[in-house]
Amino acid sequence: MTDHAIVADGLRKSFGDTVALDGLDLSVPAGTVCGLLGPNGAGKTTAVRILCSLLRPSAGRAEVAGFDVAREAAEVRYRIGLTGQYSAVDEVLTGRQNLVLFGRLYHLDRRSARARADELLDQFHLTDAADKQAKTYSGGMRRRLDLAASFIMAPQVLFLDEPTTGLDPRHRTEVWDVVRSLVDTGTTVLLTTHYLDEADQLADHIVVVDHGRKIAEGDPEQLKARVGGDRIDVVLRRAYQLERAADVLRGIAAAEPEPDPAARRISVPVRDRVGALTQVARALEDGGITAHDITLRRPTLDEVFMHLTAGHDRKAG
């Protein structure tokens, strides 16, 4: 395996007149998590399908685990795992039976398939539920069983396409813990997600795509710095004071204040984090504006995402 587990160069994919990928470049170092973010229709799922050898690119090339996805598809498939948005497990079968079935589909003999199932049940903390039907599992347990199934052949590269869709916060955290443990053992992960906090928690590197092109990349902190550094959030006691507060804060903010009437909140980017906090509190007091709370924070990936993709109409792709 090369230093980079995933490399894509100028990937293009068209479906008739619809261009899903328009020259996408991607480079993911081995043993890291890359978050692939973008609006619906940006081309994320198309990229994953090409990298998994399920689709052939219209142009460009890609390698996964050192093998060309078009010319050496069988070698690629032998070295990857894929977990999609929807569960692939059979709910009537037990957890153990599901994993043995997947092992047999990978051409393991019956004894090896059972041994591998037992290893994975232990690794993914499912041993106590091994002989219960999957339909009795919680959402987080079912997702862990999904991940375990994708690890039958201990893949070098794992593709996670919206892995925690529909899970509550506790079950999402369970899946995050499993992903971290897999990366600790050397697995490379390409993650697509609509949960920006998920990418913030897991990704070493993030690539933002829109209209089939890469429009930004960097680690989470680098991307957050693109929307103006630190921010101050002011929550007012009285919503009718929002407009006055915005006028007061314009002289302090590094850009136009952003009011949120429903939350009685106004957010302003600032350059001097400590000095600005004192200035904001004093300016509000001098203006007769009562603040319920004043918070200094870093930008969120949600704000980065909105900043990078704002105002773009899009089609499915």
Image: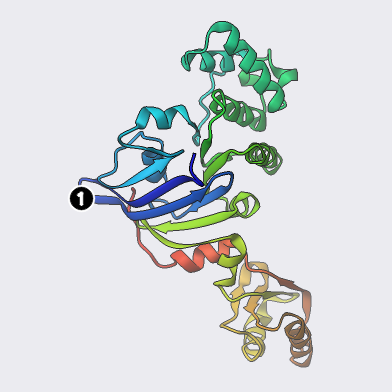
Q: Locate residue 315, reporting x and y percent.
A: 32, 53
Q: Give the camera-side residue of 70 and 46.
A: 70
Q: Judge from the rendering whether residue 313 lies leftward or rightward of residue 226; answer left or right.
A: left
Q: Residue at x 39, y 42 (%)?
A: 63
| 81 relative to 292, above or below | above
The answer to whether residue 231 is visible is: yes
The answer to whether residue 92 is visible is: no
Q: Residue at x 62, y 54 (%)?
A: 197
State the image quarter where residue 205 is shown: bottom right
Q: Residue at x 60, y 75 (%)?
A: 259
| 136 relative to 279, above or below | above
Q: Judge from the rendering whether residue 262 lies leftward or rightward of residue 57; answer left or right.
A: right
State the image quarter where residue 38 is shown: bottom left
The residue under label 1 is which amino acid type? Asp
Pointer 1 residue? 17
Q: Locate residue 46, reporting x and y percent.
A: 37, 44
Q: Secondary structure at mark 1?
A: loop
| 24 relative to 309, above or below | above
Q: Residue furthest left?
A: 16
Q: Locate residue 51, reporting x and y percent.
A: 40, 40
Q: Residue at x 59, y 11 (%)?
A: 112
Q: Locate residue 203, reporting x and y percent.
A: 59, 51
